[in-house]
């Protein structure tokens, strides 16, 4: 069994309570590592270390911070194979996905924010011949970063890189379901010369370790990515303490297909936006809305291609669908397929657990699933399933498509397929979502604002938005003349 430890003040330490719980390899359904079951004592120790490191780190020049963060990015690249395999084993995702997307994006996050902080500037406001105002943007102090299991190192670094670049020190908690690559990152940070106490990682359960971070009075801001219910709980604790909050939450994203789209590109991208990472990406288009005139053709082609996807253990180079992250999550997804049936849905393909042979017989594999025949208001079409399950529905008019697209509590992203430029702009404007992709999906420029509306979250990550979140603006007004 592998052993994960907390990383506090630059050293690897046991949890104060001395207890651990299992990290399960979802591809085999077997425990393979021990995770610290940390509590508020560990969090207090981490906050103390971060407080101690803050004056030194925030006082370093931006060139120094740039150099260290860029070095972390280089070391992630150099350790790509080890990190990709660790991510695949911990999460169940195909190794080739971790190698192509997750780990390169983790290094890109560090490289991007190492550079962004060199370009970051603040405003000044000139008042005639009277005064000049300028905005100081100062780091907040100790900040908390809490991330989910679906893109473990990718989303963990998406938070800690801007927090560190802006001069904060960090107490971070990766998901207790996928903590391995965050643990491996600690060695990389040390090798890169990140000073002790600047990044502290405390492992453990959300309700215990996570809440202790949110509650701690010296943690000035919380950057959280995860489920909407958890986000509400975190907000209820942090808001009365007036902490800065960034909440990136769940989604139920529409993928709207107009008959005038580039059909082949739409179909191959829709395969990815439906089932990449076993459908466990907050941006997956789980509700596919198709214009009536091409609905039957789309249904035929989509079902055929989905049924042909290769479900295999994640380290198999041919694997297109790996394991979902845990047994509990697999059961949750299957319960939604059952609910869809009860609501009158027809399962066109998939809908079941897949048992693999040999060492992977106890892994958590699900067939990619397509369901039709449901109305927009049923629970299957309103609630986030977060697995390889999509519904397809037809629409007659643009107005109807928009109404369906906007009628969930969520508003993270939307995808739109049309060759009609006017319609593309008109529809993008009316979609209630933080991100709209036209004729593409998950095409990311890290400078753009990233986040959702409605129950999908509050605040934006990405680019200067993230650096603004992790700094406090202070206006300085200097009078030098009379009106
Ligand atoms: P989750 O909310 O269960 O857990 C996320 C993190 O929060 C974990 O580290 C967990 O330990 C911690 N946590 C749980 N309860 C807590 C509490 N009371 N206080 C503090 N921390 C707590 O989410 P998950 O199941 O890990 O991830 C899946 C969810 O994340 C989905 O809803 C998905 O849509 C969402 N997600 C959103 C985005 C986005 O950018 N909007 C990206 C990825 C995933």
Image (cartoon, grey):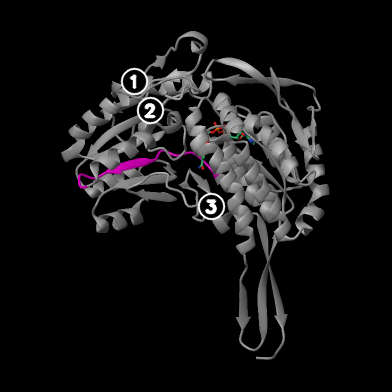
Residue that numbered label 1 is attached to: 350
Of 379 and 472, the residue lying toward us: 472
Q: Is residue 156 left or right of residue 140?
A: left
Question: 223 or 22: nearer the eye?
Answer: 22
Quarter of the figure with the C terminus: bottom right
Q: Is residue 38 visible?
A: yes
- Horizontal and vertical percent position of residue 471: 67, 58
- Is residue 343 something one can see in this rendering? no
> Quarter holding the N terminus?
top right
SS label for mark 2: strand
Identity of the residue furthest to the front in this view = 78
Q: Quadrant of residue 408?
A: top left
Question: Measured along the vertical axis of the image, is residue 119 above or below residue 6?
Answer: below
| Image position, residue 457 (x, y; %) | 51, 46
SS at mark 3 in the image: loop
* Image: 312 above or below 41: above
For marks 3 and 2, give the CA distance.
27 Å
Marked residue nearer the N-terminal end (3 or 2)? 2
Tag 1 near tag 2, CB within 8 Å: yes
Question: Does the Cβ of the disc 3 residue fall within 8 Å of ligand 1?
Answer: no
Q: Which residue is mark 3?
A: 460
Disc ID at residue 202 = none
Q: Is residue 150 left or right of residue 305?
A: right
- Give me the C-alpha separation between circle 1 and circle 3: 36 Å
Which secondary structure lies at badge 1?
A: loop
Marks 1 and 3: which is nearer the front?
A: 1
The location of residue 162, given as percent across then percent down, is 63, 51
The residue segment tinted magenta is: 248-260
Quadrant of ligand 1 in image: top right
Residue found at x 19% / y 33%: 297
Q: Which residue is mark 2?
A: 389
Spatial CA distance of label 1 from label 2 is: 9 Å
């Amino acid at each position: 069994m592998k052993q994960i430890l907390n990383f506090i003040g630059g050293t690897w330490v046991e949890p104060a309570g001395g207890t651990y719980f299992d990290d399960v390899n979802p591809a085999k359904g077997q425990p393979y590592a021990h995770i610290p079951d940390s509590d508020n004592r560990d969090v207090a120790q981490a906050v103390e270390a971060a407080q101690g490191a803050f004056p030194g780190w925030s006082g370093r020049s931006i060139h120094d911070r740039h150099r260290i963060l860029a070095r972390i990015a280089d070391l992630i690249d150099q350790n790509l194979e080890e990190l990709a395999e660790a991510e695949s084993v911990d999460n169940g995702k195909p190794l080739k996905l971790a190698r192509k997307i997750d780990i390169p994006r983790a290094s890109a996050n560090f490289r991007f924010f190492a550079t962004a902080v060199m370009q970051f500037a603040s405003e000044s406001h000139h008042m005639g011949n009277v005064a000049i105002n300028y905005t100081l943007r100062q780091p907040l102090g100790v900040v908390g970063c809490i991330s989910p299991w679906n893109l473990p190192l990718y989303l963990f670094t998406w938070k800690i890189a801007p927090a560190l670049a802006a001069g904060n020190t960090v107490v971070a908690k990766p998901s207790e379901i996928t903590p391995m690559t965050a643990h491996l990152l600690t060695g990389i940070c040390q090798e890169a010369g990140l000073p002790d106490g600047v990044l502290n990682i405390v492992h453990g359960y959300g309700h215990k370790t996570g809440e202790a971070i949110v509650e701690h009075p010296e943690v000035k801001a919380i950057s959280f990515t995860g489920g909407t219910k958890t986000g509400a709980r975190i907000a209820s604790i942090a808001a009365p303490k007036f902490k800065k909050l960034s909440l990136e939450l769940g989604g139920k994203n529409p993928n709207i297909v107009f008959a005038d789209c580039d059909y082949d590109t739409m179909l191959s991208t829709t395969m990815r936006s439906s089932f990449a990472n076993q459908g466990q990406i907050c941006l997956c288009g789980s509700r596919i809305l198709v214009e009536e005139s091409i609905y039957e053709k789309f249904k035929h082609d989509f079902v055929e291609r989905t049924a042909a996807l290769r479900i295999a253990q994640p380290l198999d180079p041919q694997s297109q669908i790996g394991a979902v992250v845990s047994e509990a999550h697999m059961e949750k997804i299957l319960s939604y397929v059952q609910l869809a049936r009860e609501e009158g849905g027809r399962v066109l393909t998939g809908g079941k657990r897949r048992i693999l042979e040999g060492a992977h017989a106890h892994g958590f594999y699900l067939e990619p699933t397509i369901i039709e025949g449901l109305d927009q208001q049923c629970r299957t079409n309103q609630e986030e399933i977060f697995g390889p399950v999509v519904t397809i529905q037809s629409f007659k008019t643009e107005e109807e498509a928009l109404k369906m697209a906007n009628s969930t509590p969520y508003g993270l992203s939307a995808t739109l397929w049309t060759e009609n430029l006017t319609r593309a702009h008109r529809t993008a404007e009316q979609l209630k979502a933080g991100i709209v992709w036209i004729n593409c999906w998950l095409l990311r420029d890290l400078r753009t604002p990233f986040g959702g509306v409605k129950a999908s979250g509050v605040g934006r990550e990405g680019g200067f938005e993230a650096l603004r979140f992790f700094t406090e603006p202070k206006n300085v007004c200097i009078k030098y003349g009379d009106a």
